[in-house]
Amino acid sequence: MEARGELRVGFVGAGRMAQGVAQGAVRAGKVKAANILASAPSDRNLGAFQDLGCRTTHCNSEVLQHCTLVFLATKPHLLPGVLQEISPAITRDHIIVSVAAGVTLQALQQLLPAGTKVLRVMPNLPCMVQEGAVVFARGSCAGEQEAALLKSLLSACGLCEETPESYIDIHTGVSGSGVAYDPDGGQQLLEGSAGSALPGWLLYWDASVSRPPKATAV
């Protein structure tokens, strides 16, 4: 599947979050652009990957054939159909990482082959400029090695931490909304989030990194 010691990363779905993760990983030297393969049903989003020097395809299963670490970056309502399509190609060597908002680890494990190493990750928009906040949680078959690999890769997009899965949806709202605030409005964001279940350090972290400098905000 891949040369010994050489990481190959796949993306099933090629939208903005997938582009941000790929861009950060390549720029940080975490993975070679030529070792990234992205799939999408049309060429609309694949151009960004091609401009980066990555390989592209219209076949989702091809990504599984060539890559061990595979990000599922489709829209949530499309994910069950995509998983049904690619499941025959998933082996115990694969590490599957879902970026689909709102799709729980329990749901993913029910849809994937038994024993699949799966993790759930939630980046935010500033990952596009490597100023993001990323949290992730492990499924029951993913261990320390898989978590360390994912954290190393995603640290290229900004700050990255493993958390309980229950924090992920709250993080999505807090950090995802941060970019809508004025760059000087972090205090309001912190105050508005004070009643959430997130620990204080993560609230502060979200409010801080979710407000990229004006020059790089997208």
Image: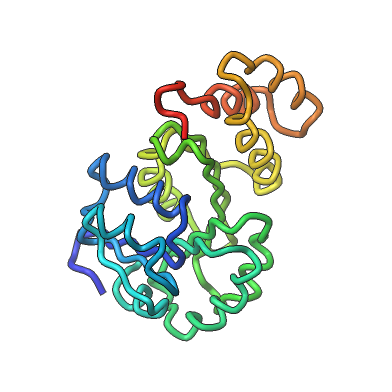
Quarter of the view holding residue 172: top right
Where residue 104 appears, as percent x and y from the top left, is 67, 60
In the image, what residue occupies the spot 42% across and 72% down?
42
Q: Residue at x 38, y 71 (%)?
A: 93
Above or below residue 118? Residue 214 is above
- Report which quarter residue 7 is drawn in: bottom left
Identify which residue is drawn at 34% across, 79% down: 62
Residue visible at 46% across and 21% down in the picture: 214
Vertical arrangement, residue 75 with respect to residue 57, above or below: above
* Percent position of residue 6, x then y: 21, 59
Of residues 157 and 2, which is closer to you in this image? 157
Where residue 22 sits: x, y (%)?
A: 35, 51
Residue 28 at what x, y percent from top left? 27, 39
Q: Quadrant of residue 50?
A: bottom left
- Vertical side of 16 occupied by 38: above or below: below
Horizontal relation, residue 2 to residue 192: left or right: left
The N terminus, quarter of image: bottom left
Q: How many marks?
A: 0
Name the one closer to the observer, 158 or 148. 158
